Amino acid sequence: MEPKEPVSLATALASFTELWSPRIVTAVNDYDVRVAKVEGEHLWHTHDHTDEFFLVLDGELNIALREPAGERTVTLPRGSVFTVPRGTEHKPSAPVGASILMFEPTGTVTVGDRHEAIPDHVDATTGHPLD
């Protein structure tokens, strides 16, 4: 993937309506830069071999985490970043909706390596190209 022009994140986000269905806007080395619109709950899942980076572009994102010390939720307002460490079970949610940007190794599935049943509103994908 070699963009010939700068990519507007606002234009990229305006190009689709599906929730929990990331679009790949560019690549950096072996990583995809993905944007997604999210609302409601994702699902509990774990990425065994990679961390997962989140940047909130608009709205607010909650990420529930199951850690050795117990369960907790981090709240990311607009402009905030957070990295979920590899092997940490987590569940993103956005009660009122959000737009997010993620860095993930190319080919990483959005539902991780281990997960609960995938609800119909979650797209189990390695990311879709922009239209």
Image (cartoon, grey):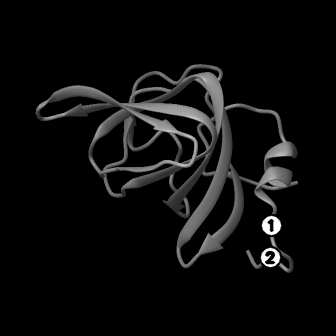
**Closer-to-camera residue (128/39):** 39
**Does 25 sit left or right of 77 as displayed?**
right
Q: Quadrant of the N terminus?
A: bottom right
Picture disc at residue 3 = 2
* Residue 48, horizontal then vertical, whole percent: 31, 50
* Residue position for label 1: 7
Q: Residues within 10 Å of mark 1 (few under 14, many from 20)?
A: few
Amino acid at pointer 2:
Pro
* Residue 131, horizontal then vertical, whole percent: 88, 54
Disc 2 is placed on an element classified as loop
Task: Identify which residue is drawn at 36% across, 55% down.
Answer: 51
Q: Residues within 10 Å of mark 2 (few under 14, many from 20)?
A: few
Cβ atoms under marks 1 and 2 closer than 8 Å:
yes
Q: Quadrant of residue 124?
A: top right
**Does 25 sit left or right of 6 as displayed?**
left
Task: Identify which residue is drawn at 80% across, 66% down.
Answer: 7
Task: Identify which residue is drawn at 52% across, 33% down.
Answer: 61
Q: Is residue 21 visible?
A: no
Instruction: Measure how far apart labels 1 and 2 are at the Cα level.
Output: 8 Å
